[in-house]
Amino acid sequence: MNNIINASEMISKVFSNIEASDLENANKISTIWKKVVRGIKNTRDEHYGDKIASHSDVVDFRNGQLLIETDHSGWIQAMQLYSKFIVRGMNMNMPDFKVESLVFRLKGNNSTLYNSYEDELRREQEVMNIKNIAAEKQMNEFLKKSGAFGANSDQKKSTENQNSKKELPVDFLAKLESLENSVLTNSKNK
């Protein structure tokens, strides 16, 4: 008798954490799932959609992904063939929920959308961190080579400018100097 009371208390605690709207949404999604899947027609079997619906259940919906559980991998293959039809039908019947893709699992497998999403997010963050570290390292090397760091970077720049002017043709240097003089005198006159 104590076991029954404890189980009852445990169940009521679990369901007390679930919002009524969440239960309504889950029921709505499941009902629409069955309706859409039953709409699948096959030339060899007019009850093909009914069979798929009886062997599949909606388990979760997060981030635009609908997690579907089946009792055999063959039903997963069948649903993958009709996935565009199913996604379109779900979105037409539930405009307030945007289904982007279907994710499947076999009964007995406890994988969830939350775990796969979190794992993928963690992997992407690690890749971005590695890329950021490499980019920062490359930027530091570039800045060191360009002379942006160090006390005599201005001296290096002026020496580089003088050296680059010496390499230019003489007639071009003359035009450049006259242009510099005219710009400097025009700015002084203002």
Image (cartoon, rainbow, N blue to C red):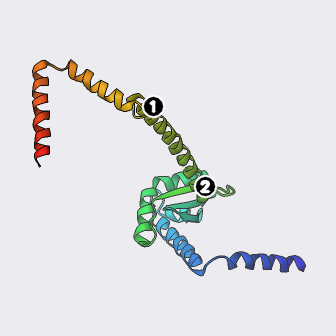
How packed is label 2: few (under 14 Cα within 10 Å), some, or many (20 or more)? some
Residue 24 placement (x, y as % from top left): 56, 78
Question: Which residue does the image show at 53% across and 66% down from the upper left?
Answer: 50
Kind of residue at disc 1: Glu
Residue 136 visible in the current orientation: yes
Residue 136 placement (x, y as % from top left): 47, 39
Left or right of 145 in this view: 1? right
Residue 112 placement (x, y as % from top left): 62, 58
- Residue at image mark 1: 141
Secondary structure found at label 1: helix
- Residue at image mark 2: 105
Query: Is disc 1 in contact with disc 2, using a CB cutoff of under 8 Å?
Result: no
Question: Which residue does the image show at 55% across and 52% down from the upper left?
Answer: 121
| Whole-number angstrom distance, CA of label 1 to CA of label 2 | 48 Å
Left or right of 169 in this view: 162? right
Q: Quadrant of the N terminus?
A: bottom right
Judge whether 108 appears above or below 150 on screen: below
Residue 43 visible in the current orientation: no
